[in-house]
Every structure is written in C-alpha cells, then in structure tokens.
Image (cartoon, helix red, strand yellow):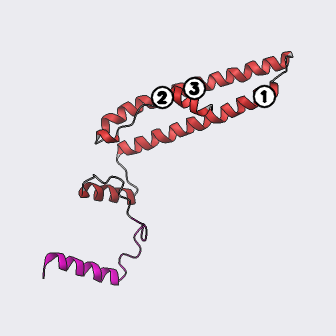
Amino acid sequence: MEFGSLIEKIIREAQAKGKFDNLSGRGQPLRLDNENEAAEAWAANHLLKIQNLRPAWLEEDLSIREELERARTELQRTHRWRVAELQQLSGKSDEGSLRQRAWVEDEWQRLLAEFRETVAQLNQRIRLLNLKVPSDQLQRAVIDCDAEVAQATR
C-alpha cells in the first residue's frame, strides 16, 4: 500500500469514528490570510491562533491598535461634546457664557495635547515593533496625528 493511500485511509477511519467532530472552527472555511506564506509557516501560525498563543511582537501590535482605538474614541467623544457645548453657547455674550466657552476650548486643547502625546508614544512603540516583526510586509506605518485629528473632527 502506498504511503499517501495509507494516510487517507487513516483519516477516513478517524472521520468515521467522529474524531474530528469537536475541532474548533469545524464547518467554517479555512482562512488563508497570506496566500504567499509557506505551508509550514501557515500551519505553525494556525496552531498558535487556535491555542490563543501569539508571538510577543503580535501581542504588542494588538496592544498598540487597541490603545490607538481608545484614544480615537476619546478624541471623537470630546469633539462631539465640544461642538454641542459651543452650539448651546452660540449667540450668548454674558460673562458666564464667555467663561464657559473659554473652559470648553481649554478642555479641547488639553485633550488634543494628550492625544498628541499618546500618538507620539504609540509611534515610538511602532518603531520598536517594526524592528521585531519577522517580515518587512508586517511593519506598521507610524500614525499621522494631524490626519487622525482631522478624521475625528469631521
């Protein structure tokens, strides 16, 4: 009996006994994220994924993405608050309204400074991450802070 035929026979017998019935992802299509990846690398990465294990550089990438998303959410939330507050104060020129308007602008500028500092820190982490990734294709671009602010304030 040929080796390939023997393997197929063993697999068919295991399928008949239901040995593959409880595998995670059963019935779902395989996700071949990188078609150019070698089969051995894909298999290793797949095993790491299904066991919820990630290389340290991938954990760092995920952490950077999550922190950026939190900072974006805070920036958008504060921008919406600022717009609503300034709309309520429009046309008012009494001393209390002027103080409130100045306070709103001060808070906005404070948050912008915090956002810029967060982006600077994330960019430093991205630069270090790019030294650790196994392939140039996996490197991340640094974050364009001005573009992020423009996107959040549309």
Q: Which mark is residue 144?
A: 2
For residue 7, side relative to residue 42 (left or right): left
Q: Position of residue 98 (x, y in %)?
A: 80, 17
Residues at marks 1 and 3, CA–CA distance in whole angstroms: 24 Å
Residue lying at 38% horizontally and 54% vertically, measured from the top left: 53
User: Is 56 on the left or on the right of 64, as rendered?
Assistant: left
Numbered label tally = 3
Measured along the vertical axis of the image, is residue 42 above or below residue 144? below
Task: Decide: is 10 above or below 142.
Answer: below
Of residues 59 and 130, which is closer to you in this image?
130
Return the residue found at the far right: 94
Residue that label 1 marks: 87
Q: Amino acid at mark 3?
A: Glu
Pointer 1 or 3: first along the chain = 1
**Front of the two marks 1 and 3:** 1
Image quarter where the N terminus lies is bottom left
Which residues, given as a range, are shown in magenta?
A: 1-29
**Residue 12 part of the magenta segment:** yes
The residue furthest front is 154
Query: Mark 2 is on which residue type?
Result: Asp
Question: Which residue: 57% across, 36% down?
Answer: 72
- Label 3: which residue? 114
